[in-house]
């Protein structure tokens, strides 16, 4: 074995003193070897020789400024020296160089917490835990290195407390604004979100992937009588379809529903043809598509009369949904029972259907249906031409206006936190 392989072998066996000697020998002939500089620096840090450890790590960074472990180890030394500002800067640099560096992110969270920025610390802890657990690590003591267990366990508790505090700070002004009684079901929904409640759907087929709101009547398909706006919108079917026909020949304004090829491949199958689900959006993630609204002014005007579930950066989703022939959208579930999905079928070839909770529905042109997509559902077009449906999200009619307003605030705040974690 080479000198480097010998040193690594000793280190893997836990023979730290011998490994350090081996790495010291490497430095005699290769003084800028980054791995050896880090290994010897860690040995010095373990023995309390912090000044030498600092010097060695500075040499390592000079040799390779973009080596994340060098910055991480430098941060650990500054932690030991009590220099929080420099420790934070080093940890931040290690994560900037390698965003998937969970251990570095964990220590960055700790440095933020020690500096008193608990909100920023929780964001880093959440990202570190999510990334590690996605790879099967830090799930339990068996999947967590012994040396990391205290910090990982601390991070778990900090995240739980931080989420609870964030929800409390969000809920208190809502209760003050609308009154505690009006907010009682919202509060129970937040308890479910925090996993501090035993409230579950009464129908086992219903499983929201994000937010469950208790005490709402449960059904895969909703009674049309609950939506007084349906007859007026159905009466405009021909006008809406004529505007659709102007759009269909053009690619302008058309978008893939799944903008990630991997996600699309996971969710779509082709039955005798290449699957494709695309559409002309009027709203996407709550943002208005002005071009399509301008081309279809009467459709846009009709949509303004509907109680769309409006949540900043999240909803509504409104589009002319185009399933090409042979497209099968595989079974999946929606995020919350607080909003429902509505379909106004405009072009329906033979052998097209929607299956919600095991109950199959055949679309009929001009006849609106509303369903709860937190039930497992799928759809297919086994016909010989495109199927087009106007899809739009509406609030669950069993919510009060106050609950809808409060939920818009709650979902926005949770979404902002998730975005902060994803972009940390």
Image (spheres, grey):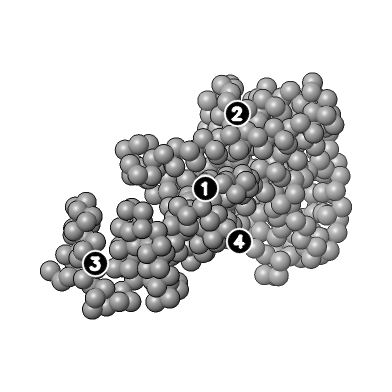
Between disc 3 and disc 1, whose residue precedes?
3
Give the mark toward the camera: 4 or 2. Answer: 2
Cα distance in 3D space between marks 3 and 1? 30 Å
Cα distance in 3D space between marks 4 and 1? 41 Å
Q: What residue do we see at 33% from left, 59% from top?
A: 44
Give the mark toward the camera: 2 or 3. Answer: 3
Along the viewing direction, whichever of 335 and 305 lies nearer the viewer: 335
Along the viewing direction, whichever of 130 and 264 lies nearer the viewer: 130
Q: What residue do we see at 30% from left, 62% from top?
A: 39
Cβ atoms at labels 1 and 2 below 8 Å apart: no
Identify the residue under disc 2. 192
Identify the residue under disc 1. 110
Cα distance in 3D space between marks 1 and 2? 28 Å
Between disc 1 and disc 2, whose residue precedes?
1
To which quarter of the image does residue 185 belong?
A: top right
Location of the N terminus (image quadrant): bottom left
Is residue 319 in view? Answer: no
Residue 261: image location, x then y, percent? 50, 61
Which type of secondary structure does the marked residue at label 3 adopt?
helix
Identify the residue under disc 4. 256
Identify the residue under disc 3. 23
Cβ atoms at labels 3 and 1 below 8 Å apart: no
Residue 345: image location, x then y, percent? 70, 47
Cβ atoms at labels 4 and 2 below 8 Å apart: no
Cα distance in 3D space between marks 3 and 4? 54 Å
For residue 374, side relative to residue 79 (left or right): right
Cα distance in 3D space between marks 4 and 2? 33 Å
Structural crowding at the residue carrying mark 2, measured as other residues with C-alpha within 10 Å and reported as few (<14), some (14–19) or many (≥20): some
């Amino acid at each position: 074995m080479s000198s480097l392989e010998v040193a690594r072998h000793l280190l893997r066996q836990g023979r730290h003193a011998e490994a350090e000697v081996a790495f010291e020998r490497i430095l005699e002939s290769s003084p800028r070897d980054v791995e050896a500089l880090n290994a010897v620096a860690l040995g010095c840090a373990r023995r309390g020789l912090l000044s030498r450890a600092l010097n060695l790590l500075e040499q390592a960074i000079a040799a390779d400024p973009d080596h994340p472990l060098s910055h991480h180890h430098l941060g650990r030394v500054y932690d030991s020296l009590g220099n929080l500002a420099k420790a934070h800067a080093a940890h931040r640099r290690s994560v900037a160089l390698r965003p998937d560096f969970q251990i570095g992110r964990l220590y960055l969270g700790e440095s933020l917490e020690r500096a008193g920025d608990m909100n920023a610390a929780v964001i880093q802890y959440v990202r570190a835990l999510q990334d590690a657990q996605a790879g099967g690590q830090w799930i339990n003591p068996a999947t967590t290195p012994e040396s990391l267990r205290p910090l990982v366990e601390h991070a778990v508790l900090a995240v739980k407390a931080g989420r609870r505090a964030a929800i409390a700070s969000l809920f208190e002004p809502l209760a003050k604004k609308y009154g505690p009684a009006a907010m009682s079901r919202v509060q129970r929904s937040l308890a479910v979100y925090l996993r501090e409640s035993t409230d579950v759907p009464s129908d086992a087929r219903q499983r929201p992937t994000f937010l469950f709101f208790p005490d709402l009547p449960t059904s895969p398909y909703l009674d049309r009588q609950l939506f007084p706006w349906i007859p007026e919108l159905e009466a405009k079917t021909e006008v809406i379809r004529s505007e659709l026909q102007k759009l269909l020949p053009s690619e302008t304004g058309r978008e893939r529903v799944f903008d990630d090829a991997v996600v699309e491949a996971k969710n779509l199958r082709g039955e005798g043809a290449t699957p494709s689900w695309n559409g002309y959006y009027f709203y996407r993630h709550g943002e208005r598509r002005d071009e399509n609204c301008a081309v279809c002014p009467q459709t846009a005007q009709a949509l303004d009369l509907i109680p769309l579930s409006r949540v900043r950066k999240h909803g509504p989703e409104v589009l002319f949904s185009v399933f090409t022939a042979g497209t099968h959208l595989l079974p999946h579930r929606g995020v919350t029972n607080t909003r429902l999905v509505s379909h106004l079928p405009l072009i329906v070839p033979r052998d097209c259907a929607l299956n919600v909770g095991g109950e199959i529905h055949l679309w009929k042109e001009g006849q609106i249906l509303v369903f709860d997509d937190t039930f497992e559902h799928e759809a297919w077009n086994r016909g010989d031409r495109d199927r087009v449906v106007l899809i739009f999200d509406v609030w669950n009619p069993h919510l009060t206006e106050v609950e809808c307003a409060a939920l818009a605030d709650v979902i926005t705040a949770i979404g902002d936190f998730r975005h902060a974690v994803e972009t940390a």
